[in-house]
Image (spheres, rainbow, N blue to C red):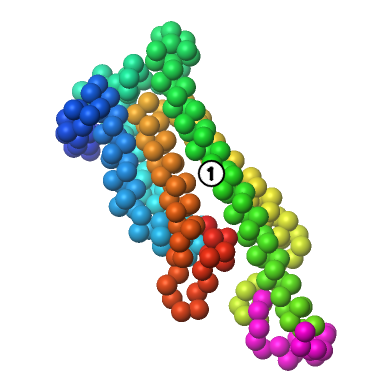
Amino acid sequence: MSVLTDPFTHLVTALAGLLEPLAAHSATAAAIVLITVLVRLALHPLSRAAARGATPVSGLLPLLLQLPVFWLMYRSFTTEGELLDHRLFAAPLGARWFEVLGEGGPFGAQGLVFLGLFGAIAVVAAWSAVRGRRSAAVAAAAAAEAAAAPKKSARRSGEPKGPARAAGSGSGTGAAAGLPELTAEQRELLRKVGSVLPLLSFGTLITAAVVPLAAGLYLLTTTAWSVAERAWLDRRPVGAGAGRPTGGAVRSSL
């Protein structure tokens, strides 16, 4: 186990030494934030690719690649070692929420550090939930517009309805252009799923309450990065190819 955790511990210690003039006794906590930022910078190209592809699998890849780093962070602050005594203000980085409740309660010196962490995570989760609901609403509106487009085009062009129209329509929008037409039930299901998924961001609060403070700090930093990164990509055209939609069509898939 130490074969993996020792190099990570040395990296955290070295970065903490560099940051000590700025962060003083919280230099190790600052080093954790810096490591998280560096990991997310390295994964940013994958996040951009996920925004272009807009598929659930590609969106999960940056999360899966972070798991080894999170595991190292967790192990480094739960096993005996030099990092256990390092602190974020008054709270040890290896402490858990239920452990500090016996050290002055939730409003003690250590408990306030955890409350500040939980408050910051809740703000980020709320931001993510609001953006997720907006994206779901935009996606539902885009799907409804795509489904209604063939009917509007047929009425304007005077095309025959029924089997004659189906046989003669070889191009256009909707299913003929390769886009599946969604039924009203499917669109309602997507709307419900889109309204529930953003609430999963608040699950980070539960995780932060049971893992060491260092791991909770990592979760806060990477979650805040994810939401800010999505917001930044949401404002920029992610498609560079000819004929690829930009603007609202791309934003609806993020």
Residue appearing at x 40%, y 31% in the figure: 216
- Quarter of the picture holding the N terminus: top left
Residue 72 higher or lower than 47, as above or below: above
**Residue extent of the magenta highlight:** 156-174
Q: Would you identify the image quadrant in which residue 142 lies?
A: bottom right
Residue appearing at x 48%, y 14% in the figure: 106
Q: To which residue does mark 1 refer?
A: 128
**Magenta stretch containing residue 162, yes or no?**
yes
Say which element carries label 1: helix
* Residue closer to the observer: 25 or 13: 25
Q: Is residue 31 left or right of residue 240?
A: left
Residue 223 higher or lower than 170, as above or below: above
- Amino acid type indicated by mark 1: Ser
Q: Is residue 4 left or right of residue 115?
A: left
* Residue closer to the observer: 205 or 248: 248
**Magenta stretch containing residue 182, yes or no?**
no
Q: Position of residue 8 (x, y in %)?
A: 22, 37
Q: Position of residue 204 (x, y in %)?
A: 49, 35
Q: Is residue 70 visible?
A: yes
Q: Position of residue 180 (x, y in %)?
A: 65, 72
* Residue closer to the observer: 20 or 3: 20
